[in-house]
């Protein structure tokens, strides 16, 4: 099943023209996020084959991290950004902060995968991935705090509320 899902995910990624999607960063975020699905399934298929033939998973937890961090987290960031912009009537454009956070997230997943694949580098790679993840979430929190102060919103204000306040100020 994993091989079939990997092939299907790869086919969809190619048909959606991943390369061309980079002309629109918000669309590219969705496409890159979905590309992680095909890769995660391919990694899972390789692990399954290793378990069947040798009794061990040669890629360790890489498939889970490609699926959880690469696919799911990338799509969550892309969809929350897109929905927040769309519901507030703003142009569907990823600003430099969102685009930067997205690539920081990609660095997190690649670092985490490197920890599975590079012998002897697991410990430092895991620590680096954790630090990058922390910086990603810290940056998001700081941006939200700046927005809350800017619009005098309560600490409980959501991203959508902040985008709505920004949109109201600009109209």
Image (cartoon, helix red, strand yellow):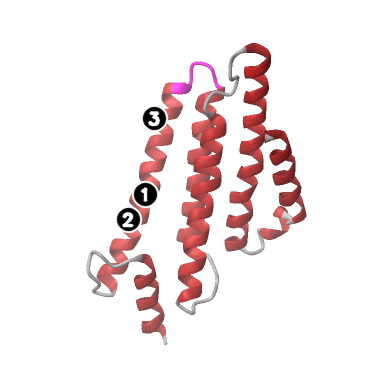
- Callout 3 environment at 10 Å: few (<14), some (14 to 19), or many (20+)? some
Location of the N terminus (image quadrant): top right
Side (left or right) of 136 relative to 93: left
Residue drawn at the location 52% of the way across and 65% of the way down: 94
Residue drawn at the location 28% of the way across and 75% of the way down: 151
Q: Is residue 164 above or below residue 17?
A: below
Question: For this rendering, which residue is in front, 160 or 22?
Answer: 160
Residue 108 included in the magenta stretch of the image = no
Magenta-highlighted residues: 118-122
Measured in 3D between alpha carbons, the distance from the residue under mark 2 to the one under mark 3, in whole angstroms, is: 21 Å
- Quarter of image, res 124: top left
Measured in 3D between alpha carbons, the distance from the residue under mark 1 to the one under mark 3, in whole angstroms, is: 15 Å
Residue 111 placement (x, y as % from top left): 50, 34
- Residue 76 in view: yes
- The extreme bottom residue here reads 171
Residue, disc 1: 137
- Element assignment for label 3: helix
- Callout 2 environment at 10 Å: few (<14), some (14 to 19), or many (20+)? few
Location of the C terminus (image quadrant): bottom left
Residue 92 placement (x, y as % from top left): 55, 71
Q: Is residue 46 above or below residue 21?
A: above
- The extreme top residue here reads 54
Residue, disc 2: 141
Q: Main secondary structure of the magenta part?
A: loop
Question: For this rendering, which residue is in front, 48 or 66?
Answer: 48
Residue, disc 3: 127
- The extreme front residue here reads 1
Residue 98 placement (x, y as % from top left): 47, 59
Q: Is residue 55 above or below residue 108?
A: above
Asked if the residues shown at circle 2 and circle 1 are in contact, with their CB atoms under 8 angstroms apart, the answer is yes
């Amino acid at each position: 099943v994993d091989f079939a899902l990997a092939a299907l995910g790869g086919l969809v990624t190619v048909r959606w023209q991943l390369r061309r999607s980079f002309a629109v960063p918000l669309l590219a975020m969705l496409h890159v996020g979905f590309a992680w699905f095909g890769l995660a399934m391919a990694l899972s298929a390789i692990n399954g084959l290793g378990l069947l033939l040798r009794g061990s998973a040669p890629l360790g937890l890489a498939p889970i991290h490609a699926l959880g961090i690469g696919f799911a987290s990338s799509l969550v960031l892309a969809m929350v950004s897109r929905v927040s912009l769309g519901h507030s009537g703003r142009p569907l454009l990823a600003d430099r902060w969102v685009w930067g956070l997205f690539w920081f997230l990609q660095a997190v997943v690649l670092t985490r995968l490197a920890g599975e694949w590079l012998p002897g580098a697991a410990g430092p790679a895991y620590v680096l991935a954790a630090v990058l993840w922390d910086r990603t979430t810290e940056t998001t929190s700081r941006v939200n705090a700046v927005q809350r102060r800017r619009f005098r919103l309560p600490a409980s204000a959501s991203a959508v509320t902040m985008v709505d306040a920004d949109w109201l100020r600009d109209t």
